[in-house]
Structure formats: structure tokens, C-alpha cells
Image (cartoon, rainbow, N blue to C red):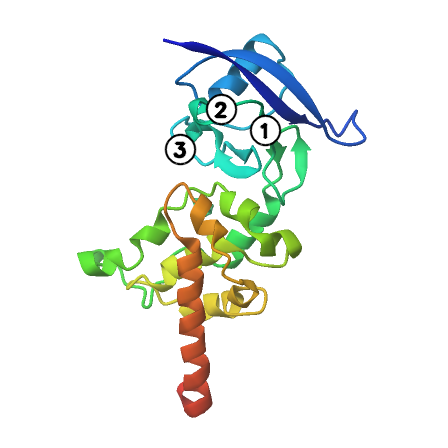
Amino acid sequence: MKERVVQLEVLRYNPDTDSEPHFQRYEVTCNEEWVVLDALNKVKESIDPTLAYRWSCHMAVCGSCGMMINGEPKLSCHTFLRDYEGVIRVEPLAHFPIERDLVTAPDDFMDKLKRVKPYLIPKKEKPISEGEYKQTPAELMKFRQYSMCINCMLCYAACPEYGLTKKFIGPAAIALAHRYNQDSRDGGRDERQEVIATKEGVWECTFVGACSEVCPAHVDPAGALQQVKIASSIDWFKELLMPWSKK
Ligand code: SF4
């Protein structure tokens, strides 16, 4: 297979020794069919074993190899070298604190996922002897798309609102809340709406849509957020016209 020398310009930062991040350039002989992650692995194996980055599955499923590639949030295992000419700049995901080199701290994202209660809260508990909580294919299709998230955080790195205010609950967490709110077996909508139908939730979103453009799993978080805005506006009108309807 054809080979090519690729210039990678990689952001380096070791909090123990560096006062601030800096770029380091590597010349790597790569196969034309490789992805950026392969080139980083070659650097680590044969040029510089100190380079730090996360990855696991190499097949766009685990969501751990997200980074900025020429300024765009991408999965490095799904970004082909053949699509780039000249120097390829590789940086850690934007809007997250850097732990070391290309590794960022996901704590804020994990905290936001927890806040939206991303699990089924059954409408009514029933004993196991009564069997499963069944669902029709049509009911499944209402939320299936929003359940495909791989927690890669690319949507947060692309979101200008999250860049401005870390209070924003953000695209993936709200899309996940919407996934459970749409589930016919769930009874936790009111609890989640208290978190997401708020100023720090959907009303912080200005519908730039970059989250959906970069999402490698086609979740369409921007679409989910707009649906939550519509649903919470309807709730507000209902409460205004029929205050007794609110439990
Ligand atoms: S919604 Fe898409 S971009 Fe955001 S974390 Fe999930 S998979 Fe990644």
C-alpha cells in the first residue's frame, strides 16, 4: 500500500513540568489508508513514548478518542489522513480542561449526565413475575436515535454556548434526557424537566446546530433540544391556562 510522510503538529502539555501548552511537530511515515489515530500510535510506538491521548475501540464506538483536528472536533479513529493536505494540527477537545497532552478531564460532562437522570424511572413498579415492560416498534422509534450517543463529547467541543458558559447542561446530556422522556415505559419526565427546561438547560441554546453537524453517531442533539423547547413551552401554556392541571 502507498506510504506518505505526514506532518503532525500536536499540542503537548505536562502540568508537572510545563507552565503552558506548546506545539510539537512530528514527521511520521504513514500508510495512505490510515486514520489520525494510527499516526498518533506510530508516534508513540516509534518516536515519542511520552505522548498521552485516549483511545480504545478504533471503530467509532467507544467515544474515547475525540480531539480537535485542524480545529474541528473529530474522532481520531474515524478521521482519514487522505482527507488532509499539509500539516495536520491535533489538539485536545475544546472547552475541557487539559489533563495532559491530548487528554482532557470529562468531569463536568459526567456530572451533567448524572443530573438529567439518564435511566428509566418506571411509572409503576411491578413484580418480576408480571414480566417485562413491553413496547411497540413505533414506541421504540420515538427515542431510538437519541439512545445512540457514544459520550464522545464532540458536541460540547463544538458548542459555542458551552464555550461561553459551563453552566449550560449542553447537547448530549439534554438529548439523553429527551431520550428517556420519550420512552413509553418512563415516568420521570417531570424530574428531568426541572433540570433541562431551564435557563441553564434548553433556553441557553441559541440553535447554532454545530453539535449535530459534528456528532459521529447521528444523534441530532440540536433537534432534541428544539423538541424539548417546544414541549416546555406547551407545558408553560398549559400551566398558565389550567393551573390546576399541575400536580
Ligand atoms: S450527542 Fe453525538 S457528539 Fe454528543 S456526545 Fe453523543 S455521540 Fe458524541
Q: Position of residue 42 (x, y in %)?
A: 52, 13
Q: Is 28 drawn above or below residue 135 in the view shown?
A: above
Between tags 1 and 3, which lies in front?
1
Which quadrant does the C terminus fall into?
bottom left
Which residue in the rendered view is the most extreme toward the front? Answer: 85
Separation of marks 3 and 2 at Cα, in angstroms:
13 Å
Q: Position of residue 215 (x, y in %)?
A: 43, 45
- Of the image marks 2 and 1, the number of the one nearer the N terminus: 2
Circle 3 Cα neighbour tier, 10 Å, few/some/many (<14 / 14–19 / ≥20): many
Q: Which image quadrant for residue 168?
A: bottom right
Q: Residue at x 49, y 59 (%)?
A: 116
Between tags 3 and 2, which lies in front?
2
Q: Which image quadrant for residue 51?
A: top right
Judging by the rendered image, the residue that carries numbered circle 3 is: 60
Q: Is 181 drawn above or below residue 245 in the view shown?
A: above
User: Looking at the rendered structure, which numbered label has been put on residue 36?
Assistant: 2
Q: Position of residue 85 (x, y in %)?
A: 51, 24
Q: Position of residue 147 (x, y in %)?
A: 35, 50
User: Looking at the rendered structure, which numbered label has been put on residue 42?
Assistant: none
Separation of marks 2 and 1 at Cα, in angstroms:
9 Å
User: Looking at the rendered structure, which numbered label has been put on residue 90?
Assistant: 1
Q: Which image quadrant for residue 44?
A: top right
Circle 1 Cα neighbour tier, 10 Å, few/some/many (<14 / 14–19 / ≥20): many
Q: In the depicted view, which residue is nearer to us: 107 or 98?
A: 98
Circle 2 Cα neighbour tier, 10 Å, few/some/many (<14 / 14–19 / ≥20): many
**Secondary structure at numbered mark 2:** helix
Q: Is residue 69 left or right of residue 63?
A: right
Kind of residue indicated by mark 2: Val
Separation of marks 1 and 3 at Cα, in angstroms:
18 Å
Q: Residue at x 39, y 66 (%)?
A: 227
Kind of residue indicated by mark 1: Val
